[in-house]
């Protein structure tokens, strides 16, 4: 079965991956912070997608598709166009470079992100591994 990014099935697959991946559990064992990922329409994506992920000590406690950002207050909000985030998902754009060049905008503590680069990179690895197809 193809897991298409972005989709509710992709979000569920990511939840399952984060909670079963031993490498992620070890690397992210000290991470404390939930996030919203906002994917702005571009290319074939015609509407905004907002995903909520509650990440805590190497596990994902909850995921949810949101209609807007008003329903939750998360530690981080990551925003990118579909085009930029699909480049990250395909491995064509380094996530840290995307943050530094604001192709992936971070609202929240950039210092915390920078202190936890291995966690950020392994989170992205998990995202890539569950993605079998890009919209």
Image: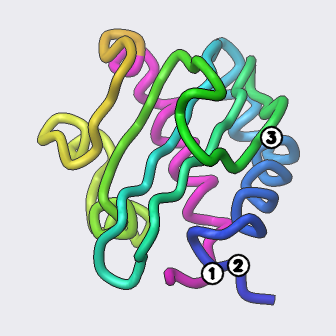
The disc at residue 3 is 2
Tell me the SS state at disc 2: loop
Asked if the residue under mark 3 is in contact with the one under mark 1, i.e. CB atoms within 8 Å, the reply is no
- Name the residue rendered at 17%, 35% in the picture: 100
- Name the residue rendered at 27%, 37% in the picture: 105
**Residue to which mark 3 is pinned:** 22
Left or right position of 41 against 121? left
Sooner in the amino-acid sequence: mark 1 or mark 3:
3
Asked if the residue under mark 1 is in contact with the one under mark 2, i.e. CB atoms within 8 Å, the reply is yes
Q: Nearer the viewer, mark 3 or mark 2?
A: 2
**Residue to which mark 1 is pinned:** 132
Report the span colored magenta: 113-135
Residues under labels 2 and 1: Cα distance? 5 Å
Considering the whole magenta stretch, tell me its main secondary structure: helix
Residue 77: quadrant of the picture = top left
Q: Where 97 falls versus 60 (above or below)?
A: below
């Amino acid at each position: 079965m193809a897991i298409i990014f972005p989709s509710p099935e992709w979000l569920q697959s990511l939840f399952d991956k984060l909670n079963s991946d031993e490498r992620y559990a070890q690397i992210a064992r000290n991470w404390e912070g939930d996030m919203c990922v906002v994917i702005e329409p571009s290319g074939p994506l015609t509407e905004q997608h907002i995903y909520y992920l509650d990440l805590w000590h190497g596990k994902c406690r909850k995921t949810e598709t949101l209609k807007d950002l008003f329903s939750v207050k998360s530690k981080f909000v990551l925003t990118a166009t579909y085009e930029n985030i699909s480049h990250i998902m395909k491995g064509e754009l380094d996530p840290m470079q995307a943050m530094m060049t604001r192709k992936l905008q971070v609202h929240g503590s950039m210092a915390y992100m920078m202190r936890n680069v291995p966690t950020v990179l392994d989170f992205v690895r998990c995202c890539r591994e569950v993605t079998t197809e890009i919209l």
